[in-house]
Each structure stands twice: as C-alpha cells, then as structure tokens.
Image (tube, grey):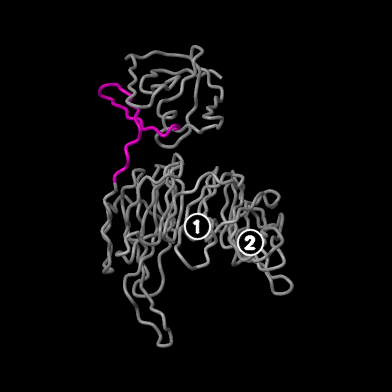
Amino acid sequence: MLKEMKGFVTGVAVTLVVSFTACIVFASSGEQKISALFDNIKVLINDSEVELTDANGNAVELFIYNDTTYIPVRAIAGAFGKEVIWDADNKKVIINDPTPMSMSEPLPIDTHYVPLPDIDSEKVVGSTVDENHVINNDIIFEKTQGYAKVIEKNPDAFLLIDEKGNYFAVCRIEKNGGYSDICITKYSSSGIEIKKQTYGGSDFDWASAAKYNSKIGIVISGISQSFDGDFANTGNLPFIACINPETLAVKWTSPVQIADSVYHVSDKAVYVVRNEDEKYSGKGELKLSIVKLDANGNKIWATEPLSQWIHAVTELSAGRVIGIQKFSDNQAVQKGGAINCYGKDGKKLLTFEADCYGDISPTNDGGFIMVSSRNIKTIPQPAYISSIWYDTETVVTKYDKEYKVEWRKTYDSVKDALGFDKVLPLSDGSVVVE
C-alpha cells in the first residue's frame, strides 16, 4: 500500500550499514512530499528475523521509495546492539558502540527501620479498588455474576482471564490414594464451564503459580513427584509447562531448578530460574541463572550465575531484563536487595543496591515499578507464639528506563498490627491500592 510522507527530515534512514563506529550521517535540509510503499517488509540477520523498534520499544515499519528500502537508523543500529545519538544542533546522527553504563547512585541503605523518605511522591498517580472490582492473583477482576460463580467453585485457585473475558481456574485436586493432580477449568464470562482438564501422574503433582499471555498461552509452574504422566521427571523436581488455552492440551514442558513460580511471560518469551550445571539439594554454593525460553520452551540464553536467591524477573522494552535478588551481594548489608539489569542478549549491564526488594512490573515508558514489603517494628504478640511479629509497610518505587528512581512512596494503613497494603502497579505507571 502507498502512503504519503511529508517532511521526512528528522526520521533519518539508511539502506546499508557498513561500519558502526563513529558513523555520521548528513541530511539535506528542507521539506518535500514523497509517496512510499509499505509492504510488511521483514529484516533477517544471520537468517533470523529481528524485530525493529524505536527508542520507546515500539515496532517500526520499513518502506520503499524510488526502489530503495529505507530502515530507520535507530531501529537497525539497535538490532546490532549499537548506540544512536541525535545531534539536533548540528543535524547529525552518530552511531557508536554502547558506552558501558556506570553504577547508579545507590539508595541509602536503611538498617534502623526508620520510615523511608518519599522521593518526588507527588508524581505518584494512584487510585483505589472500588466496590465493583477486586484484585486477585495480581489481576483486577470485575465482580460480575460470572466471576462470583467461578470463585465460589474454585476459592483457592490461581484465577486468570483472557482477552475475551473467559476465566481459567488452576488448582490442585485430590485423587484416589491421597495423591493430587493439577486441574485447569475454563469458564465463559458468565461462569459456565467450557472445558476441564487434569494433569499429573501416579504421585503428587501441584501447581505453584500460573500466568496467561494471549500470544503464548497459559504458563504454569509446579512440582511433580511422578515418574509418569504429563510432567514426568526423575521425581520431586520443579517444572514449567505451557497449556493451549483453547484445547487445554500441554504444548510443552521444561524442567527447571529452584523455580517456585512462573517469573515472567511476555509475548515471545518465558523467563525461569535454574541451576545450569546440577540439581540443587540445599547444600553447597548456590549459583542461579535467569533463563529465557522462547514460545516453544527452547532455551535462548542464560545469564551469568548469581550467588543469591532471585525474587522477581521482568522484561522491559527492547528485550531488556530486570532480575531482583533478595539480598545484596554486599554481605555487610543484612537487608535490602540487588537489582540486576541485563540487555536483550542476557549480558549484564549493571547491578545496584536497593534498600528493599520486591515484585516488579514493567511500564510503557521503558521503566518499571517495584513493590516491596518491609518491617518497621515489632508488635505485641500472644505468649504462646514463638516467632516475632512485625508491623510492616509497603514501599513502591518507580524506576525510569535508565534505571534511576523517579519516585517512591510508602503505604501503611494498617498501623501497629499485622497486615499490609496491597499495591498493584499498572503499565501506564500508575498504581492501584486495595
């Protein structure tokens, strides 16, 4: 199809990239009207199709003009892992090898349990869940009759919802002999059962987490002690499985190590955590890697091993990845966490400390929000309780695409007692408080 383009000046394009070091492109000034052909053009590098994106991670479309195919500089340079700088004053496009990112200024490490200061908290856009909605499994559900029916039948299930409003309940069911299987039931938006499927073998099988993605399907993680059945392995090992949301058939399974949940599912990948070399038995040194699987469960890459527990993983724009460790690599820091930032190839860009760790959600601007729960002080407890009870507060921190703090806010509506505020980040950078 033909499209008219006016003033194609700032959208500088190239047809052939010869060298990416100190490359400067000059464009003539002025404005002209052209007709260009857009025909769903693809780019392959070493026989592999690449997704070309702009600085914000949005897909860009190529076009043909005067029998020449034009590709935006930033898109093709990014595909080769290069850095693009636009010098507006001198009308220059500069392409270089990326400059290694310097260590971000660490946040103050708080070891005395004083309230954390807010950082530009006026930037926080927050709302509360109204009486017609509820947060369940980090999803905001509308309290319809269909939702009520599904919850009544599956009170302890991992509840998911697809783009058509269908519900998926992932739960554990008992079977003869005292063993258990995994069950997934699909319901219509009105709560009518559409399809039901059980998974497992002759021993115990159960799901620990579940996520849904319209491009990949239902992804569950769990433990299988069965030597036979859908998730058969050598016994008592974690697994990741992908389920077809239409038929509820198993698309693929992947054995993992340590993974106690599905860490993240994007449109094209599933992120898990495993010991690459050997099974971890609770003894010896812990070396965990974040592993990226494609839509078919095949390994794409693994990060370098980390010596501490990984709490959360998410994918940002342009395929960048964030991994949150429960504790800092600095052994002198007793509380807090480490934020590990990786490129789209799984290579580490930088690591910096944070004074608390938590779950993370990507935002549309290329950054992410981390939600943490931290202890403030001890509170009274019955004499027969041997553990320590803490009053907690929820800390929400927004990082931009350069991994720098934009704002931070604390919530503590349940004061001097057990309980915490549940905060759900949204992709637009706002938060919903339950």
Measured as percent of width and height from the top left, residue 109 is found at 27, 61
Q: Which residue does the image show at 48% across and 31% down from the upper left? A: 52
**Is residue 5 among what the camera can see?**
yes
Q: Is residue 137 magenta?
A: no
Measured as percent of width and height from the top left, residue 396 is found at 36, 57
How packed mark 1 is, by other alpha carbons closer than 10 Å (few <14, some 14-19, many 20 or more), is some
Asked if 210 appears above or below 29 in the picture, the reply is below
Quadrant location of the C terminus in the rendered image: bottom left
* Boundaries of the magenta span: 79-102
Q: Nearer the viewer, residue 138 or 388?
A: 388
Q: Amino acid at mark 2?
A: Val
Q: Which residue does the image show at 39% across and 19% down from the upper left? A: 8
Q: Nearer the viewer, residue 140 or 34?
A: 34
**Is residue 139 among what the camera can see?**
no
Q: Which residue does the image show at 45% across and 41% down from the upper left? A: 344
Chain-order first, disc 2 or disc 1: 1
Which residue matches tag 1?
138
